[in-house]
Image (cartoon, rainbow, N blue to C red):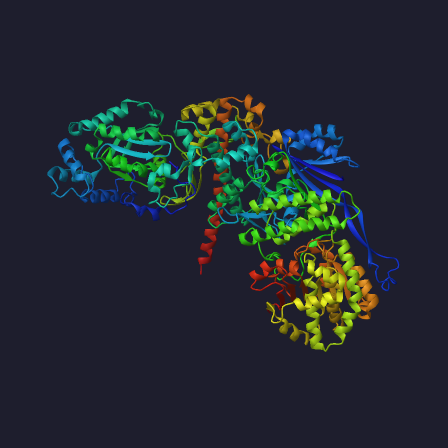
Amino acid sequence: MLEADLTSGGSLTKLAYYSTVQHKVARVRSFENSGRDAEQEHEPPYEVSVQEEVTARLHFVKFENTYIEACLDFIKDHLVHTETKVIQATGGGAYKFKDLIEEKLRLKVDKEDVMTCLIKGCNFVLKNIPHEAFVYQKDSDPEFRFQTNHPNIFPYLLVNIGSGVSIVKVETEDRFEWVGGSSIGGGTFWGLGALLTKTKKFDELLHLASKGQHTNVDMLVQDVYGGAHQTLGLSGNLIASSFGKSATADKEFSKEDMAKSLLHMISNDIGQLACLHAKLHCLDRVYFGGFFIRGHPATMRTITYSINFFSKVPPRPRPAPGASLLPCARHPNQYSWGENYAGSSGLMSSSPELCPAQRARSGTFDLLEMDRLERPLVNLPLLLDPSSYVPDTVDLTDDALARKYWLTCFEEALDGVVKRAVASQPGCVDAAERAEKFRQKYWRKLQTLRHQPFAYGTLTVRSLLDTREHCLNEFNFPDPYSKVKQKENGVALKCFPRVIRGLDALGWEERQLALVKGLLAGNVFDWGAKAVSDVLESDPQFGFEEAKMKLQERPWLVDSYSKWLQRLKGPPHKCALIFADNSGIDVILGVFPFVRELLSRGTEVILACNSGPALNDVTYCESLIVAERIAAMDPVVHSALKEERLLLMQTGSSSPCLDLSRLDKGLAVLVRERGADLVVIEGMGRAVHTNYYAALRCESLKLAVLKNSWLAERLGGRLFSVIFKYEVPAE
Amino acid sequence: MGAGRLGVPMERHGRAADTSASSAGESAPEGPDGQQRELLRRRASSASEPPVGSSASASAEGIRRSRPGSYSGAPSASRQRVESLRKKRQLFPWFGLDIGGTLVKLVYFEPKDITAEEEEEEVESLKSIRKYLTSNVAYGSTGIRDVHLELKDLTLCGRKGNLHFIRFPTHDMPAFIQMGRDKNFSSLHTVFCATGGGAYKFEQDFLTIGDLQLCKLDELDCLIKGILYIDSVGFNGRSQCYYFENPADAEKCQKLPFDLKNPYPLLLVNIGSGVSILAVYSKDNYKRVTGTSLGGGTFFGLCCLLTGCSTFEEALEMASRGDSTKVDKLVRDIYGGDYERFGLPGWAVASSFGNMISKEKREAVSKEDLARATLITITNNIGSIARMCALNEGYFGAVGALLELLKIP
C-alpha cells in the first residue's frame, strides 16, 4: 500500500486507500526460435504463461464512526510492506481522531482540507466511472437513469449531504467556491430520528421510513383546506407543515410514520436549497453526494421529488453517489481508473429486504474498488458528439424483456465458463475450487440484478460481460481462453498463405466481397458452439469455408455492401482504424487479409486490440506476435509494419465490448495524428451490443454475424444473419 | 396563516374568480371603499344571502330566506332600512377570521363610540358578544386573547374603538361554530369575513351548523393588506416593523424600528404552520415565491414529540431556557475550531441534532435543550431560505431592469 486517505466526518468514516494488488495475468511470448517453427507442424506459435502482476487499485471503504477502531485495525492489517509514514486524513474526524490514528497506525496524520478533497473526488468520479452519476426518476421504470461521462463536467453545483449540507459551486478542476450550506442534513435525520424513534442506526431509520406514512404526521394542504383544495387547484397531498399533525392531534405516532416524515422534511429542505442556489448561480447541473444519498433510493427519491417540485424549469438533478466515497483523489488526471465490478458492493447493498447477507455488513462496511489502468482513457476523437455518445445499444435497465433474456442467457452460459476456466489451468490443484467460487459470485450478482437491475449502474450486455471478466480475474482466472487462442492462432497462421493465394487469384470485385465474407466468417467462430470447434480442430481450412457457407446470402439483414464497393472504387482512405475481435481465424484469416488489401490501396491501418484478455478476443500482445508471424510470410504486411503504415495499438480495454469514450490515450493521439478517415468495428460485442448507433465524424463500417437467435430475431433476422453497416457522415 | 401553500406558485388574481365569495374578496374588513359597498349591494340583492335585520323576528325570517332558492317575497321595510345603513358601513360586530392549519386568529373591533341611540338599538346577542369577548382574556380551555397586542383608540371606518386579537387551536373550530350557533350569531347578519385554508375547510360547517355564510378571502391578499394596515396605524404609537441590529452579538444586539414608508420591493415571509414567502412589488402586486413545510407547526409538533409539551407557549418557554449546542453538532465539534477555508465560525451549527446520534449525548440533554435546538433549526432554515429568495429576487429585479432597457427604442 502506498497511500491511504481517510475522511472522518461527523458520522461516518470513509477510507480510500491505494494499494498494489498482486494477481495473475496471462502473458504471451514468442519463442526464441520463432523464425523456424513455422515448419514444425505441431508447435504452438508462441508461449503462454501465467505470471504474477502487480497493479494499482483504489479501494473505498465506509465505516460508521463507532467502528473507527475496527477501521484502523483494517488499515493496519492492510499496511503490510508499506513505506508509508504519513496518512492523509480529511473531514472533521481528521482532527478528532488524530491521536487515535497516530497511535494505532504509527503514522503521522496529514490533515487535508475536506472540501478540496471532496471536489477533487467528485471530479474524479464524474470523469472515471461511467454511469456513476444518475438521474433518479420517481415512479418511472427504471427509476435510475445513469449518465454517461460528460466530456465537460463543469460548471456544476455539488450538494454534499453529510452530517450537515455543503453547497459548492465547482467551476473548474481546482476552482470552486463554497456558496452555502445547511445544518439540516444527514446528521439531523439520524439524530432527530434517533430521538423520535429510539432507533439507533442510520440504515434502520431509513428502513423504518420506507414503511411509514408521512401523511399521518405531516399536515397536508388538504388538512388545512379540507376538500376545497381541488376547486382551488391546489394539490391536497402537499405538505403544508412538517410534523404539523403531531402538534394538533393528541395521539401516539408510529416510528415508521415519524421517520418517513423526517425523511421528507429533510430531503425537501435540501432539494429546495439546492434549487435556490442553482437558480442564483445559473447552474443547471446539480450533483448530490454524501452518505445521506449513497445507496439510499429513499433519500434520492425524496430529494429528486423536491428538486422537481421547487424548480419550475426543472434542472437536471444528478445525484452523484460515488462522491461520498471519494475523500481524496490525488493526481486525478494522470491515470484513468476503472471500477472493478467484482469488488464493489452494489448501489443498494443496504437494502435489507433484498439481500440479508449483505445487510449484515452494510452501514458498517461498503466497498468500491477501482483498478488503475495503465494509461489514461479518452474519447475517440472521431466521435461525432462525445457528449451524447452512449456505447450501449440496449439499456437493460430500461428494457425488461431484453434484460430477462440476457440474464437467463448469462446464467445458462455460466457452467460453460466455469468449465472453460478449470480447463484453462490443467496443472492447478485449486482451479476447480476457485472456479466454483467464481460461479457463486457471478451467480449472486446475476440474481441481484434480476431484482435490482440498477444495482451496479446501468445494466447492459457489456456490463454483464465485463462483470464476468472481473469476477474471473478475481479468482485468478486471468485468461481462460489463453490456450485456446494459442492453438487457434497457430492453426490459422498455417492457413494464412493459402487464403492469401486464393484471394490474390480473384478479380478485384470478387476479391472485395471475398474479403468482407472472410471478415464475417471469422466472426462466426464462437467457442461456445461445439460443432464449430470440432470442425476447426480437424480441418481449419475446411472450417473457414464451412463458416462462409453458414453466412446468410446477400442481401444481408443490414446490407450496405454495394455502397461500400462503390466507395472502394474511389480514392483510397488515408488511414483506417480497425477494432479487431476474436483471436485465430477471425483476426488472421479475416482481418489481416482485409488489412493487407487496404495497405495495398495505399491506406494506412491502425489495428486496435484489447489491452487485456476478454473471452477469446485477440489481445494487443497476441496481435504483436501474430503480426510478426504474418510479416514473416507476407511482404506487404512486412513492409507496412516496417514503414509504420501498419500500426498495432491497444484499446485500453479488457472488455468484449467497446466504449469509444474510454480509449487508450496513445491510440486517440495516433488516430488524430494519422487523420483516420475510416473506422472498422467488427463483432457482436463491439458493433451490435455496443456502437450499433454510434455516430462518427468519418466513414465507418460495422460488421457482425448474429450468433444469437434471440437477438437476430429482435433485429428482424435469423441465426447467422449478417450486419454490414457502412455509414458516411452527413455533410 | 401561511399553511397549506407549500410551493404552490400561482397568481393570486387568477384564482380569485374561483368562488363567488372571493371574487368580491378584495375587500378587507377595514375598507369601506366603493368596492365593498358594491359587494354588499350585490349581496343584498342576492337571494342566497342572509338579509341583515336588527330584530329577532327579522332574523328568523332572514334565516328562512337564506335557504337557497327559498326567498321570493319583496324586500321588507326593515330590510330596506338595513340596506340604507349598509351603504354607509357594515353593521357590528366587526370580525376578521383567519383559520390556519394550527391556530384560528380572530380579530374583533370593539366600538368605543357607541351612541346612546345605538346602544338602545343594539340587540342583546351583539351586546353579549361584545361583553363576552372584551371582558375575558381566555375562552373555554384553549381560547386566548392576546391582551398585550390590543390596539387601542383606533379609528376604523369612521368608528373609534379597540382592536382585539384572539386565538384558539384550529381543532377547536367545531366548538367555536357551535358557540356561534348557541349565541345566535346568524341573527346578527354580520358578514363573516374569513381567510386561511380553514375558510374553505369549515365553510360548510359554518353554514349548516352555525347558519353563517362565510365571506372567503384570499389569505395572501389579506396578509399583505393586514400588514400594511397594521404598520400604518402603528402599535399604540410605536412601529410594528422592526429589525435587530448586531444580531450575532448578544450585548450589542438591539431591536430597532424599521420604516416601512417606502417598502417595495419586499420579501414577506409568513410563518404559520408552514411558511409562505412572497415577493411584494407594490400594494397589490405580489407573487408567492416559495414556501417551506418547516414552519411553526414543525417547531411545535417536534417539541410535542420530543418534550411532551402541550402548548405553543410551553414549547417557546422551554426553548428560551435550553442550550441547543448540546444537541447540535457545531463546526467546532467537527473541526476543533473555525473552519477557515469557508469562513465558518466554530459556533455555527454544522448539523442540527447532529450530536443526537450518540447515545451518551442523547441521555445528557434536557427537554429544554431539545426545544431550543428545534427552534434554532427551524428559524435558521427559514432565514436561510428567505435569504436565498431575496438574492434570487434581486436578480429578477435586475433582469426586469434589463428588459426595460431593451424596450427603449
Query: Which residue is at the front of the view, B355 or A682?
Result: A682
In the rendered picture of this protein, how many numbered marks are placed on residues?
0
- Residue A569 located left or right of residue A267: right
Which quarter of the picture shows residue A655?
A: bottom right
Is B356 drawn above or below residue B286 in the view shown?
A: above
For residue A669, say whether it is visible.
no
- Residue drawn where x is 19% and y is 40% of the image: B67
Q: Quadrant of the C terminus of chain A?
A: bottom right
For residue A53, say whether it is visible.
yes
| Percent coordinates x, y for residue A228 in the rendering | 33, 41
| Percent coordinates x, y for residue A656 in the rendering | 68, 55
- Residue drawn where x is 83% and y is 68% of the image: A633
| Percent coordinates x, y for residue A643 in the rendering | 81, 67
Q: Quadrant of the N terminus of chain A?
A: top right
- Residue drawn where x is 66% and y is 74% of the image: A565
| Percent coordinates x, y for residue A163 in the rendering | 58, 34
Query: Which residue is at the front of the view, A422 or A585?
Result: A422
Q: Residue furthest bottom?
A: A507
- Residue A575 located left or right of residue A252: right
Is B145 drawn above or below residue B10 in the view shown?
A: above
Is B108 drawn above or below residue A178 in the view shown?
A: above
- Residue A481 located left or right of residue A35: left
Which quarter of the picture shows residue A497?
A: bottom right
Query: Which residue is at the front of the view, B403 or A723?
Result: A723
- Residue B6 located left or right of residue A527: left
Is B347 drawn above or below residue A481 in the view shown?
A: above
